[in-house]
Structure formats: C-alpha cells, structure tokens
Image (cartoon, rainbow, N blue to C red):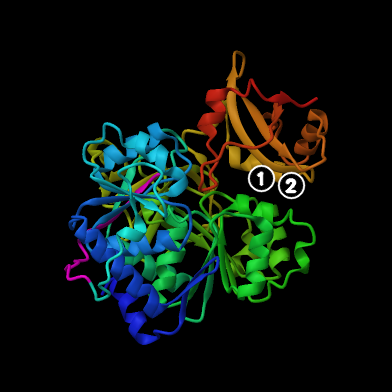
Amino acid sequence: MNVLSCLAQNARRHPHKLALIYEDRTYTYAQFNQTVNRLAHGLSRLGIKKGEKVALMLKNSDYFVICFFAAAKIGAVLVPINFRLVAGEVRYILEQSDSVLIICEEELDELIEEARQGVSAIRNVITVEHPKVTGHVSIHDVFSELEYEPEVKINNADDLQIMYTSGTTGRPKGALFDHQRIQNVTIAMLGTLGHNAQDRFLHVAPLFHAAQLNICLIPAFFVGATNVIHREFHPLEVLKAIEKHRITFFFSVPTMYNYLLQVPDGQTYDLSSIRRCGYGAAPMAAELVKKSMELFQTDQFYNLCGLTEGGPSGIILWPEEHRTKIGASGKTPLLLTEARVVTPDGNETVPGEVGELILRGETIMKEYYKKPVETAETLRNGWLHTGDLAVKDSDGYVTLVDRSKDMIISGGENVYSVEVENVLYAFPKILEAAVIGTPNSTWGETVTAVIVPKPGERIHTEELQTFCREHLAGYKIPRDVYVVNELPRNASGKLQKFKLREQYIVKNERLH
C-alpha cells in the first residue's frame, strides 16, 4: 500500500464521490483517477521512465494535482518549483535535480524556455494549456485514451519527490523523499488531525510547498476527502469558499491568516463548517492566533511546527494547549517523530536555555539531493539538525525563537527576533513586522524593525518604542524602525530576512 494505490482504491470504494473542485471543473474519484491514468500513459508515451525527474512549475489548479499523481504513477520523481522564481533560479533547480521534463503554466512558457537553455537533460516541455513557444507540447496532446492503471511496479523505497527548501537563507537545497517517507507523513497527519472521507479541504497555500502538499493534499486524497483548490490567495474569496463549500479543514501560513483578518465584515461569513484549523511554515504571533480563533469561531487550532526536511514533521501545539501556552510551538512530537532541544555539545537544554531543535523519525528526508557535504552537516547520528533555535519552559513546551543565522547580538546580549516580532504584532497599527540585526560600530548589531502599517495608519518611532518598553528589556527594543509597503517573502509566505540584510534597508523610508 502507498499513497498512489489509495487513489485507485478510493475510485473503486466511492467512484461517484466528489474528489476535486477547481473553478468550474469538478471530478469524482472515478473521473479523477481515470484522468490521472490517461496522463500517466501519455507521459510514458513521451518516454518518461521510472526514476526520472519531472519538474512542475505550476500554480494551484486541477492540473497540478493531476500531473503530480500521473508522474508518480509511472515512478517518476516529482520536482515542484516555486512559480515566482526567475529564470536563473529555475535553471539552477532544473540542472541540480537532473530534471528531464518540465510541465509549466502557459504564462511561464517563455520563462521556462529561457531557464532550460544549457540544461542538457531536459527533453520536453509540456505547457498547461496552450504553448507560446515553438517545440513545447500542449498538455491536451499528451493525454492518452488509456484509462487503466499503469503497469509500473512502485516500491515504497522508490523515490517520490525532491522538495526544494524555501531559500530563506540562500540557495535552495533539494530534500529527497521516497514513497515510504511520504506515506509515513500521511499517517502522521491522519493520526494527528483525524482527517476522514467526510472532510472538505480548501487548498490556498501553494501546492509546490511541502506543507500544503504533504500535510494537506496527499492525506486528503489518501482518505478520499473532497478538495477545493484556489489558484491564488484572495482573502475575500477564501471566506466565500468556506461558506459555499462547507469546508471542514483549513490550513494556512500566518501571513494569510493575517490578511483574512483584514477583510471588511469578515465575521459576517458563515464559517461554522470549519472543524479544525492548522497553521505553520513560520512562527505565528499569539495575537494573530487569538484573532483568527475569533474569526473562525473555533478554538480547534493546531500549531504544526515542522520543516521541509522533516517531511514536514516536527512538534505540535494541540488546541487545548492553546489556552495556556498560546505562542509556543508545541511539546509533543508528531507521530513517528522524536524531538529534542540541545546545546552545541549535544546535551539536553534546561528550561530557559536556548538550544537547537533536532528531529529524528520515519518522516525525515533521505538526503539533500546530490549534496553530500550539506547532508552530512544536517543529518548527524540519525538526527536532523534544523538550525532552529528554541527554548523550553518548565513544563517542557518548546518555543522557536529564531533561525540560528538570524540571531542578533547587540552589546554582547542575544536578541531573538521572534520575541520582538510577537510584541510588534500586538501593536494595533502594525500589519506585518520583521526584525533583523544591522551593523553598529558600538554595539556590534542594532535591533532593527521593518514594518508594514495597516492601511491609513502612521506610526512614529517614539510611540512604537514606548509600546515596546512595556513588554521588552531595553536592549531588545528596536533602535531603527523602517516602513515598507511589503516584506520580502517567498511564495510559501516565509520571510526572506537575508534579502532585508542584503538590501540593508537603505531604500526604505524611515519612520519619524
């Protein structure tokens, strides 16, 4: 059994059950499985062999899901790519992953043609739906008439996907997973979140990211649930879709929850169908969690603290734990996972001491594809060293405080950006905030805040610093405060602080 065989099983178990809704296109489980099989046979006809790499540069749609399952059914290894990358960044991933086929959006056709130049392994480009570049193939011409299951034997030890890290600290690395590991992630999610065939999922976070793909989409198809897919994130349309489709489970990143809270009269939408909400991919300020609970009128929120290399897997903060530990990352490792917070010499930290979160388990990546040095640095003695700095309280609850590369040292004192950002998010005029260290000849580094005000709001540095003094020690208070229209984020919603540091914020308008 694996995540692919369950797709065919669900087509037999409940063939007429609604599997997928995208815009005006709908598929029952029987129709969806047949469509997947038709594309799988078409890919085989193009010469795609078991073990070869197939890159997907697609936005959320029915085609993303169909292409993913179709390539997987013939034993290909999927390489989802961030559709917001530029040609040079795409070229790096195509070459590093050994991709032989690219399936891309029509609007990205010309970018892909530029990106593939010099990548000798690429044999074909399939466009969804109509090619703009001579030589690219329309996906409509690839579909076969054959609807039976492909006769390719898939073993659980066969590779399934290479998930490239978000590149928040530099060049992305490809985390390699086999079918067994992704099945383990699926089992862990089902055991944690209790998904079943009666659930209705809304997918708005990008499917090329491990969180939406492996936490939500694959488990949903595994149990035979209904999936509603949105091409892009529009806060108002999300609330409308939850009401219209009676969505029962919703996962999103903190940034998206924040924008949902800005929808005028958001409380007037009927969100009562929601039974569970998940959040992750980045720390979420306690104030945002509280307000999101009010919007969704439920306290059934799960903090899923993990990372791409973990499957993603990690630790969880259960709904009932939010009552007393809101803002913490969690205490209990997810199923099939162990977690520790350790000092640089590998000893367990004591309460209040900052250490590194490390993970071990059956969901962890095999390796960084073709990067033995980075793999050896990250996977040591069976443990995945996450690079996330964390602290445990006296009850054993873990809170992420920073990436190890993002910690600020000012006047010899360690400042953890997440702690400062949580305070900034509680300031009523701030929409988004990021905290970094900038060079200072006297103190080494200065705590610097980059903020996005709410529409129509003006914030003076002095009033913000006065607010911070009520919640932070003096050395943690931002000395420099800058205003921007938006923060640099990747398509997964994660802050790219390295870009802020590279830009040194000199082009941004300073608050007065």
For label 1, the crowd category at 10 Å Cα-Cα, with few meaning under 14, some 14 to 19 and many 20 or more, is: some
- Is there a contact, CB below 8 Å, between mark 1 and mark 2? yes
Residue with the mark numbered 1: 422
What secondary structure predominates along the stretch shown in magenta? loop
Question: Where is 236 relative to 108, above or below?
Answer: below
| Residue extent of the magenta highlight | 150-165
Q: Position of residue 162 (x, y in %)?
A: 31, 50
User: In percent of the image, x 70 and y 53: which residue is there?
Assistant: 287
Q: Is residue 379 left or right of residue 208?
A: left
Q: Is residue 151 magenta?
A: yes
User: In percent of the image, x 32 and y 76: which residue is there?
Assistant: 6
Q: Is residue 431 left or right of residue 374?
A: right
Question: Where is 34 relative to 207, above or below?
Answer: below
Q: Name the kind of residue labelled 1 in the image.
A: Asn
Element under label 1? Answer: helix
Classify residue 462 by image quadrant.
top right
Query: Which residue occupies the foreground of this view, 82 or 61?
Result: 61
Query: Which residue occupies the foreground of this view, 78 or 375?
Result: 78
Please identify the residue farthest to the top as the structure is shown: 441
Q: Name the kind of residue labelled 2 in the image.
A: Ala
Give the position of the C terminus as an image quadrant. top right
Q: Is residue 254 magenta?
A: no
User: In percent of the image, x 37 and y 40: which residue is there?
Assistant: 112
Element under label 2? Answer: loop
Question: Where is 334 relative to 378, above or below?
Answer: below
Q: Is residue 423 left or right of residue 66?
A: right
User: Distance from label 1 to label 2 (Cα)?
Assistant: 7 Å
Residue 426, label in figure: 2
Query: Which residue occupies the foreground of this view, 429 or 438?
Result: 429
